[in-house]
Amino acid sequence: MATNSRFERSRIAAGNVAYSASRTTIETAFYGNNVEKIFDLSKAYEMAANSAGTIITDMPVFEPETIGLPEGAKVLLFNDGETVGRFAGARIILGEKGVNEADYAAILREAVYGTRYKRMLHTQSYIGLDRDFMVRANLLVPETYENTLYNWLLNFQYLNSTYDEMYAKSAVLGTEPDIYILSDPDWKDPRYPNGIAYFDPEHNCAALLGLRYFGEHKKGTLTIAWGIASRCGYASCHGGLKRMVRKDGKKHVMGVFGLSGSGKSTLTHAKHDGKYDVTVLHDDAYVISSENGQAVALEPSYFDKTQDYPLTSPDNKFLITVQNCGATIDAEGKLVIVTEDIRNGNGRAIKSKLWAANRVDKMDESINSIVWLMKDPSLPPVVKLENPILASVMGAVLATKRTTAEKIADGVDKDALVFEPYANPFRTYPLSEDYEKFKALFEERGVQCYIINTGHFLEKKIPKEVTIGIIESIVDETAEFKAFGSMTDIKTIEIEGFVPDFKDKDYVDLLVRGMSNRINYLNSLYDYKGGRDYLPEEAKAAIAKLIEGHR
Ligand SMILES: Nc1ncnc2c1ncn2[C@@H]1O[C@H](COP(=O)(O)OP(=O)(O)O)[C@@H](O)[C@H]1O
Ligand SMILES: C=C(OP(=O)(O)O)C(=O)O
């Protein structure tokens, strides 16, 4: 699909979804005589390299011409300052209870006026890498934020003849207009000391004000694109997806869903010691068609943590830009980066599409399994959910912990267990839409569902090697699923050192409390956001059935 860019004059009028107070305020800012269009990736590279404060390392970009960069391009490092993670508390979503457009339209108008004396840079990209799903997006940032512009063009698909042709062939679906995003990281308003991420999801626009971190731009853009996808018959996925082909030729397409830091990238890019022929779709953002179960990647490159990758790691060959990391001079006098989160938490990098040896933009095979990645100490390393309602609702009550990828508001316990439905804090539409779409994948397409715990089981850390072993046993069909206590519709694999003891009353209490908390959470959705996210009664009933007899 493609979005609508231009309209006959007769349609430039009230009633057209492309024209609303917020959207028109944001779009208008793109046409000032202080705005310059930077659509060319090489030009964006040169501008970022010349931007004040950019560190041009002596680390070369791998095969720069293949990915649209000039010969001799180097890895660029740019650091943000105090904030090095996304701040969910800055999000304001028009359409949610208590959000009044007139209030925010005034803030937007003032923010646009505030850009008057700045040179502004406009760029454009495609979100979605297959003619089945492609959206045109525009970003406006002030001069001096050339690194943000460059990263955004790298993260999403910069315009080039291949994708322009694909987009031209992609059918326009419905009335969805192009995405417009205004960002002014220097914006200040004493009422909002932590900035604002304002979204008008019905009109495909957003304003990121006072936010420097690139992740805000990436996830802000995806917020709108995922909303479009949801309206157009796709399940929006904050997850990784890959195909593993066994030596005997049997294929398994697996999607892993998790909050930032849950292991999406680690598990998606795991190579399994050459056991399978692995093809990656993406490690963070894609959409699954409800019609045919096929998944389309939304982004070409990978915005990943640098924590696990020491300087000499072979994966660093694929770095293009780095954020919030250190720099130093090595023994040979070369300027290199300092990773492993030595400088601060959540060091990040954009890695090239070439990182995954086999990479596709669309997975032709329908998905076989969905994994909810959780960090819930009451759950063993893996359980299998054998009922579509239970499988879908457990995604809706995905329990996890926050990481350094997020800026946490003062006073909030960063170790607390939180529920983050489908690991997607970027949803702007009713939760039931995701609930029904995932349920349909389990019910109608026979997709299997697992919960994999990538945190601790009780006090004991579950190492990533154990998790990767579990994935392999699922793909190899060697996993021996056993009863999970006396609970129905749920099974587990016994893994040495992590076997739940149902004779231990404390353990059973903990497990039952975890499930009861999930029911309480579903009950809380009755009032939260005006009841927008309330799920059908069957969802709660499926969890209640699980703990029947245990309470
Ligand atoms: N059992 C596990 N499975 C996956 N990752 C794990 C596990 N235990 C620890 N980790 C670590 O957790 C981090 C997960 O980060 P990452 O894969 O980038 O998450 P995401 O892509 O979901 O943001 C990595 O540093 C990884 O080494
Ligand atoms: C940048 C982010 O993505 P990830 O899930 O890769 O941490 C984020 O959520 O802020």
Image: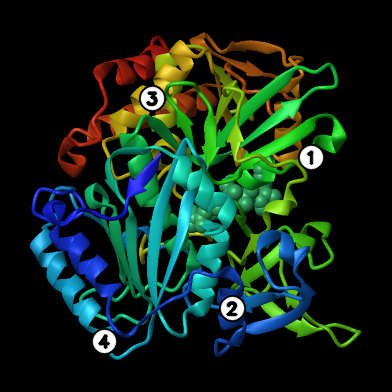
- Label 4 Cα crowd, 10 Å radius (few <14 / some 14-19 / many 20+): some
- Label 2 Cα crowd, 10 Å radius (few <14 / some 14-19 / many 20+): many
Which residue appears at 78% of the width and 57% of the height?
315
Please name the residue that numbered disc 3 is placed on.
437
Please state the horizontal and vertical placement of residue 294, each as a whole percent of the image.
53, 27
Chain-order first, disc 1 or disc 3: 1
Please state the horizontal and vertical placement of residue 498, each as a whole percent of the image.
69, 28
Inter-mark Cα distance, 1 to 3: 30 Å
Q: In what element is the residue under mark 1?
A: loop
**In the displayed structure image, the side of residue 329 where residue 414 appears, left or right:** left
Chain-order first, disc 1 or disc 4: 4
Please name the residue that numbered disc 4 is placed on.
116
State the image quarter where residue 61 is shown.
bottom right
Which residue appears at 19% of the width and 33% of the height?
526
State the image quarter where residue 274 is shown.
top right
Inter-mark Cα distance, 2 to 1: 30 Å
Residue that protrudes farthest toward the right in the picture: 332
Amino acid found under the numbered disc labelled 3: Lys
Please name the residue that numbered disc 1 is placed on.
271
Amino acid found under the numbered disc labelled 2: Phe
Please name the residue that numbered disc 2 is placed on.
78
Inter-mark Cα distance, 2 to 3: 39 Å
Q: In what element is the residue under mark 3?
A: helix
Q: Nearer the viewer, mark 3 or mark 4?
A: 4
